[in-house]
Image: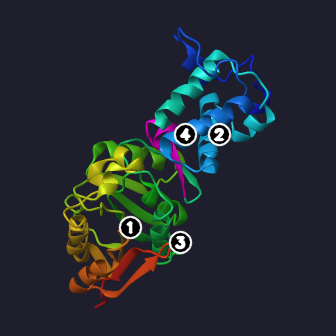
């Protein structure tokens, strides 16, 4: 790709030229520069999404850079370049989507997770920093010097499965999901990031897993109560509902996860899963009732119990 520093207002990036084709009327942003347009976009996003100005400015910069096909640093170096009509149209289209509440990750088609960029779409949950706690807890129990079997239930984008596979190249990771569209995204992420030790299987939880025994079972299951008001707010409005909510108390999927785990775990194997902020005690009780040992929970950076685990007893 041509270096961003070589692009000028007279030579718009390829996607900006494409976005401008067929536009009969000039965009309201036409004739602006980056420096004059950025405050306006910041104000619009802050008002539409009730964001703090610093966050709104960052989102505006991210959307502008994506629309122009450049890095954010280019915006600083070329802040006085006049924006062409195709460039202005491309920026306006993305900003309007964001004003409507569409998550930035879906607009960009990607989200960073554990230091890597993952493809995302409305078919999968957006990877979040909280889930990195699940990955770290699993890595601490996955040996780096010998083979291991890992099962990721409800893999979605594959961010957990692919990260574990790349951090533990000797592990064989089975990523399952009930959604064919989600599995397509997970396969693409495994391919793009070079995780050849990930296999993706269509399955309703354990249904198609077979009789394999796993050293680690991980999951970021749906755990929001069906009537929770948050489902109608923010990014959650756009994410797949089946991957978010699970029963009246949000624990239906976790009950299934725990109930089926022991018959698929190797002796001394671990089950680890993410859950909601008030669900830690209930999850530990489910793990203990199933006969697992060394049950424990970990808190996220906000001090909230976010991940719980239990271990299969050894003979």
Q: Earlier in the sequence, mark 2 or mark 1?
A: 2
- Real-space Cα separation, disc 1 to disc 4, in angstroms: 42 Å
Mark 2–mark 1 contact, CB under 8 Å? no
Between tags 2 and 4, which lies in front? 4
Nearer to me, 73 or 199: 73
The kind of secondary structure element at disc 3 is loop
Between tags 1 and 3, which lies in front? 3
Whole-percent x, y for residue 199 in the image: 37, 54
Q: Which residue is mark 2?
A: 61
Outermost residue to the bottom: 315
Between tags 4 and 3, which lies in front? 4
Magenta range is 100-113
- Residue lying at 52% horizontally and 39% vertically, measured from the top left: 108
Q: Which residue is mark 1?
A: 150
Q: Which mark is residue 301?
A: 3
Q: 168 left or right of 36?
A: left
Mark 2–mark 4 contact, CB under 8 Å? no
Nearer to me, 44 or 314: 44
- Residue lying at 32% horizontally and 58% vertically, measured from the top left: 154
Q: Which residue is mark 4?
A: 45
Depicted 73 relative to depicted 81: above or below:
below
Which picture quadrant has residue 257?
bottom left
- Real-space Cα separation, disc 3 to disc 2, in angstroms: 27 Å
Which picture quadrant has residue 74?
top right
The kind of secondary structure element at disc 4 is helix
Q: Earlier in the sequence, mark 4 or mark 3?
A: 4
- Residue lying at 50% horizontally and 47% vertically, measured from the top left: 50
Whole-percent x, y for residue 21 in the image: 55, 13
């Amino acid at each position: 790709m041509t270096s961003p520093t070589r692009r000028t207002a007279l030579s718009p990036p390829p996607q900006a030229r494409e976005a401008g084709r067929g536009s009969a009327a000039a965009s309201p942003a036409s004739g602006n520069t980056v420096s004059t347009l950025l405050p306006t976009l910041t104000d619009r996003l802050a008002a539409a999404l009730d964001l703090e100005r610093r966050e709104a400015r960052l989102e505006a910069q991210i959307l502008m850079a994506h629309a122009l096909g450049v890095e954010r640093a280019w915006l600083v170096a070329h802040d006085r370049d006049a924006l062409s009509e195709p460039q202005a149209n491309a920026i306006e289209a993305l900003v309007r989507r964001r004003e409507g509440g569409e998550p930035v990750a879906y607009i960009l088609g990607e989200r960073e997770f554990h230091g890597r960029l993952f493809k995302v779409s409305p078919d999968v949950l957006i990877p979040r920093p909280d889930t990195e706690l699940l990955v770290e807890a699993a890595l601490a129990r996955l040996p780096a010097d010998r083979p291991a079997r890992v099962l990721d239930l409800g893999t979605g984008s594959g961010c957990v499965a692919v990260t574990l596979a790349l951090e533990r190249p000797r592990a064989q990771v089975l990523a399952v999901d009930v959604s064919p569209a989600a599995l397509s995204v997970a396969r693409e992420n495994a391919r793009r990031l070079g995780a050849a030790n990930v296999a993706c299987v269509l399955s309703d939880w354990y249904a198609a897993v077979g009789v394999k025994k796993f050293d680690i079972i991980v999951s970021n299951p749906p755990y929001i109560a069906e009537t929770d008001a948050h489902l109608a707010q923010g990014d959650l409005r756009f994410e797949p509902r089946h991957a978010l909510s699970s029963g009246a108390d949000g624990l239906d999927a976790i009950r299934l996860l725990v109930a089926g785990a022991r018959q698929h775990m190797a002796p001394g194997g671990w089950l680890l899963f993410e859950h909601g902020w008030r669900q830690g005690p209930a999850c530990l009780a489910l793990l203990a009732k199933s006969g697992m040992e060394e049950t424990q929970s970990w808190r996220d950076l906000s001090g909230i119990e976010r991940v719980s685990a239990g271990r299969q007893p050894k003979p």
